[in-house]
Amino acid sequence: MTVAFLYNDIFRNSSFGKNHPVLPKRISNVYDFTKLINLRKKVDYVENKKANFKTLQLFHSFDYLEILKKTEKTQCISKDNARKYNLGTYSNPIFKQMFSRHATSTGALILATDLIKKKYKYVFSPGSGAHHAKQSMADGFCYLNDIAIAILVLKAKGYKKILYFDMDAHYGDGIIEYFKKNQEVCTISIHQENLWPKTGTYLYDSMHNTYNFPVSEGFNDSNFKKITDEIIFKIIKKFSPEVTLMQMGADCLKYDKMSKMELSNNSMSYIIKIMKSLSEKIIVMGGGGYNPWITIRAWTYNLATLAGETKSLKINKKAKDFLNNIKYKNIPKHDWINYIKDEPDIF
Ligand SMILES: [Zn+2]
């Protein structure tokens, strides 16, 4: 099955700043790397544009969007507005493409909502997944809530059963809190308990299709297999989604410094594989992910799983050189530059 990989070079040419946890090139790395390994035949690389202002207004307030756009242009903000809109902070700094980059992430998902109606069953958009952005403020490195906007667009297109699955270590508050009383949008989130934003306590609300699973530090593959096999797959089967959006933040994986969850990248592949049997149309996004090698390998593996090409996930010389050349403060472990799949694979 051919997968559409949505991308725009704004991800290569923009940065949150030198010391920000969102590493420069994390998205373009995935784009470049997947072209080096044997996925080309099963992946169409499609360039997407920015979402327009009107579409962004489906979720965000006009005044917030105006300030965000203006701040991008002037590169400064008043103290009052900085406080009101949570901009110009350590987490949500002012940078050159602060509006355009996030409008492009949103544009990818808007295009995805079209593509799944026409040519593709599966879409991959690693630059999307800003699950913390609120209607009138930025939050947790997220300025525009591309996911919430895409869900609203899907609803406008007539979809009545939309599943949002969030695997990021942090609770997807920006989407889940907004849709939590909306029966047509089923949300399932697995996240580390007591981690920022410190909400998302256990919830099993089958009336409104909202399910939160906070998990303990050290949450690993066998814990994941148990919760998915015994609970989550049953919920999805019952809901029977027409379309599914998956936020696959790689900060839930072992060796990501932002959480103490200890999943391997096989867990992500496992849930994508099962999801393909439960949902006809799937949009897989990125999200958090602060260890460059862990993130690039996991998201490449996710793409290969969507494409049904996990057997060809071999690292050749060019791919190995690519991983070796990623600059980061730590030195990569042997496995991170020689293999894509983590070992062992218990699934
Ligand atoms: Zn996260």
Image: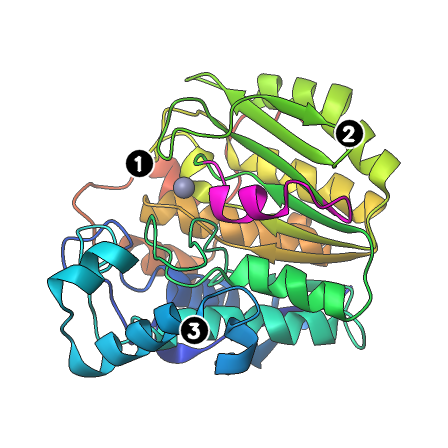
Q: Amino acid at mark 3?
A: Phe
Residue 5 vs residue 314, the one in the foreground? 5
Residue at 86% across, 44% down: 240
Q: CA distance from mark 1 to mark 2?
A: 43 Å
Q: Is residue 162 left or right of residue 170?
A: right
Residue 209 vs residue 246, the one in the foreground? 209
Tell me which colouring the rendered structure shows. rainbow
Numbered badge on residue 333:
1
Check disc 1 and report its element: helix, strand or loop. loop
Residue at 43% across, 54% down: 134
Give the quarter of the figure containing the N terminus: bottom right
Numbered badge on residue 62:
3
Q: Are marks 3 and 2 in contact (CB under 8 Å)?
A: no
Task: Classify 10 Å Cα crowding around label 3: few (below 14), some (14-19), many (20 and above).
Answer: some
- Quick check: is 175 in the magenta stretch? yes
Residue at 49% across, 48% down: 174
Closer to the eye: label 1 or 2: 2
Q: Amino acid at mark 1?
A: Lys
Residue 125 vs residue 67, the one in the foreground? 67
Q: Amino acid at mark 2?
A: Ser
Residue range highlighted in magenta:
171-185
Q: Are marks 1 and 3 in contact (CB under 8 Å)?
A: no
Total labels drawn = 3
Q: CA distance from mark 1 to mark 3?
A: 46 Å
Callout 1: CB less than 8 Å from ligand 1: no
Q: Position of residue 153 (x, y in %)?
A: 67, 68
